[in-house]
């Protein structure tokens, strides 16, 4: 099972805001950068946030990331129907050497 | 533009082997760590393995350690995953992904995936 825990689902109406939490530990989130990925069903994942709060070129500023201690949060404002997708957090985990990458359990975002 | 194209997937019997390849283009391949990530039908993302830029350091998920071997050929801009002793639970879409830099960095580009089905 994953070392990163996310809520299974979140939902909101168009134009509203949602937040997705990602809970880890000191050996994962606590000491490493967090990334966030968006996956529309049937397609490959896409990087949304890297290094806790940075957006790659082309990602709108409606998407934001933050980290505090052993948890991270993805925020999506101005929710659009195109934002319906699965979202995963990811980080390096050094609890067992030599280390490994870990993805969160995933959160399905539904636009009501 | 960055392109990652996986190949080699298919149907294979339990206990047999399969080799996946990933052809990379549009970036300096030797400057990026690379990953394999899989997704079983209806399930979430599972990291499988990673290799450092020079190919000397390799990391594996416990679920594949000792059965899968990841390698890269920087002269050919190619990534590989040798999968031995395959099991039903290895059935998944396998993605290759480019790291933004070192081994712990985010995966900023992904291939379209190749499906591996382990079944008798």
Image (cartoon, rainbow, N blue to C red):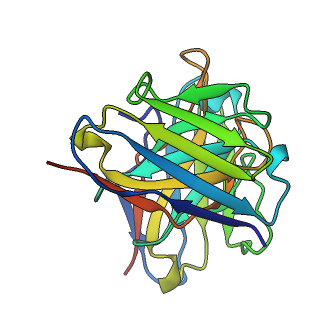
Quarter containing the N terminus of chain A: top left
Residue B74 in the image: x percent, y percent?
78, 45
Q: Report whether B90 appears left or right of A19.
A: left
**Viewer-closest of A96 and A10:** A96
Q: Is residue A73 left or right of residue B65?
A: right
On the image, the x and y values in percent for residue B3 come to 69, 68
Q: Residue at x 72, y 72 (%)?
A: A59
**Residue B88, placed above or below residue B98:** above
Judged from this view, the residue extending furthest toward the left is B120
Position of B8 with respect to A100 (left or right) is: left
Q: Position of residue B42 (x, y in %)?
A: 28, 59
Give above or below for A42 relative to A56. below
Please tell me which residue lies in front, A96 or A20: A96
Residue at point 73% right, 34% down? B52
Q: Quadrant of the C terminus of chain A?
A: bottom left
Figure quadrant of residue A76: bottom right
Q: Is residue B102 left or right of residue B72?
A: right
Residue A17 x/y as whole percent:
55, 71
């Amino acid at each position: 099972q994953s070392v990163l825990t996310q809520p299974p689902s979140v939902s909101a109406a168009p134009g509203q805001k949602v937040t997705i939490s990602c809970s880890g530990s000191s050996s994962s989130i606590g000491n490493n950068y967090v990334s966030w990925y968006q996956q529309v069903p049937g397609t490959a994942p896409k990087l949304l946030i890297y290094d806790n709060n940075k957006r790659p070129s082309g990602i709108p500023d409606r998407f934001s990331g933050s980290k505090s201690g052993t948890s991270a949060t993805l925020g999506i404002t101005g929710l659009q129907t195109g934002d319906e997708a699965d979202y995963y957090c990811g980080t390096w985990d050094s609890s067992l050497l030599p280390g490994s990458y870990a993805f969160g359990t995933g959160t399905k975002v539904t636009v009501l | 533009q960055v392109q990652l194209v996986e190949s080699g997937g298919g149907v294979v019997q339990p206990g047999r082997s399969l080799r996946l390849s990933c052809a990379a283009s549009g970036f300096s391949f030797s400057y990026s760590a690379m990953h394999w990530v899989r997704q079983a039908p209806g399930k979430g993302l599972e990291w499988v393995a990673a290799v450092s830029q020079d190919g000397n350091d390799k990391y594996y998920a416990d679920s594949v350690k000792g059965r899968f071997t990841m390698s890269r050929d920087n002269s050919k801009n190619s990534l590989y995953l040798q999968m031995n002793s395959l099991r039903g639970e290895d059935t998944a879409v396998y993605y290759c992904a480019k790291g933004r830099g070192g081994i712990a960095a985010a995966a900023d580009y992904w291939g379209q995936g190749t499906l591996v089905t382990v079944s008798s």
